[in-house]
Image: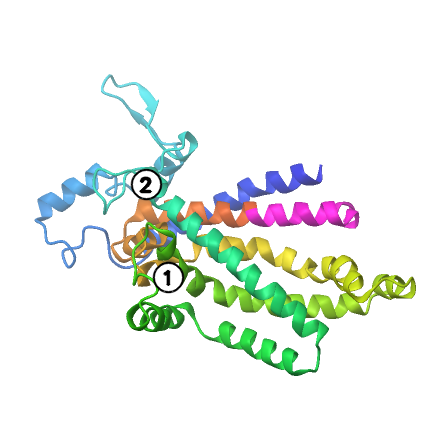
Amino acid sequence: MYFLRRLLFLFPLTLVIVTLAFFLVRVAPGGPFDRERRPASPAVERALAAKYHLDESLISQYLRFLGLKWERGPDGAWRRAPGGLLTGDLGLSLKYRNHTVADIIRQGLPVSLALGGLAFLFAMGFGVPIGFLTAVRRGGIADWAGSLAALLVICVPAFVIGPVLILLLALRAGWFPVGLWGTPAHAVLPMIALGLYFGGRVARLTREGMGQALQSEFVRTAQAKGVGTAGVLLRHALPLGVMPVVSYSGPMLADLLTGSFVVENIFQIPGIGVFMVNSSLSRDYTMVVGLVLLYALLLLVLNLAVDLAYSLLDPRVRHE
């Protein structure tokens, strides 16, 4: 029942998010066929607006987007308009002509998923050991150095780290390609640029979690039973210490999978982040709403997975 309630909650929440995105992107100033961006005659603009149903009212466009629009056919009979979200059809892109939103997502999503997954592994591999070391050596030089490193990478944004990595490791050292995507070497610098911030957050969470775990009765009992230091730290304290990281991993993974548009633009990686930026700038309504829907589903599903993991680890969560 716990899983079913959380799963059913996803549908209305997703609908609210998509509805807000649909109306906000349309009431924003500018349009996809503005003369400033794409000079065209008024007749051509009207034809384009009619082709994409932008000449209809907002409510009519919304019902068509959902797949709930009914209209008269050539024979005069009422019928449901083709396409719509209910049928899994997100429509045609207004910027990338003759391409559907679903096709573009299928093209860019695997790249973004690969980059986000690698950055997630890098963040965990960077943050957990540093957090563990700073907690165990609390107050010492290792604690000071590790905490400072974690704070620095949190404070420096990816749009600064990316160009610095390109300058030092690609242009001067020549160890990695400057940009683009295709080989493992192409993924190294974007992975670091994207994962460093989250690695710093993981390090701080691990340090705090380990600090609380080392003070718990469970760990003191293990020490009283004569368990060695390594056994206490790795077998008893570490599983408790990483619980905050487990809670954070869902939103972190969602941010990594969907929030890489800055890094993708810096390194010219053909993921969905590039499409998100270009679509927003060109007022590609259907593309923006489709990507918002994708981001929302990723975020909600990953958070649900974390909640389920918590409920499995702690039965009290299921009873609340």
Q: Residue at x 67, y 61 (%)?
A: 244
Residue 86 location (% of width, % of height) = 43, 32
Q: Which residues are magenta?
A: 302-320
The amino acid sitting under disc 2 is Val
298 lies left or right of 267:
right
> Would residue 318 be found to the left or right of residue 191 on screen?
right
Residue at 26% of width from left, 19% of height from top?
76
Rendered location of residue 141, percent (x, y): 64, 83
Q: Main secondary structure of the magenta part?
A: helix
**Of discs 1 and 2, which sits in the foreground?**
1
Q: Which residue is mark 1?
A: 263
- Residue 313 colored in magenta in the image: yes
- Nearest the viewer among 39 and 221 is 221
Image quarter in which the N terminus is found = top right
Residue 19 can be seen, yes or no: no
Q: Which mark is residue 73?
A: none
Residue 205 sits in which quadrant?
Answer: bottom right
Q: Position of residue 128 (x, y in %)?
A: 62, 63
Q: Which residue is mark 2?
A: 101
Q: How crowded is the residue under tag 2: few (<14 C-alpha within 10 Å), some, or many (20+)? A: many
Q: Nearer the viewer, residue 115 or 19?
A: 115
Q: Is residue 51 left or right of residue 246?
A: left
Residue placed most toward the observer, 244 or 86? 244
Counting residues from the start of the chain, the first of labels 1 and 2 encountered is 2
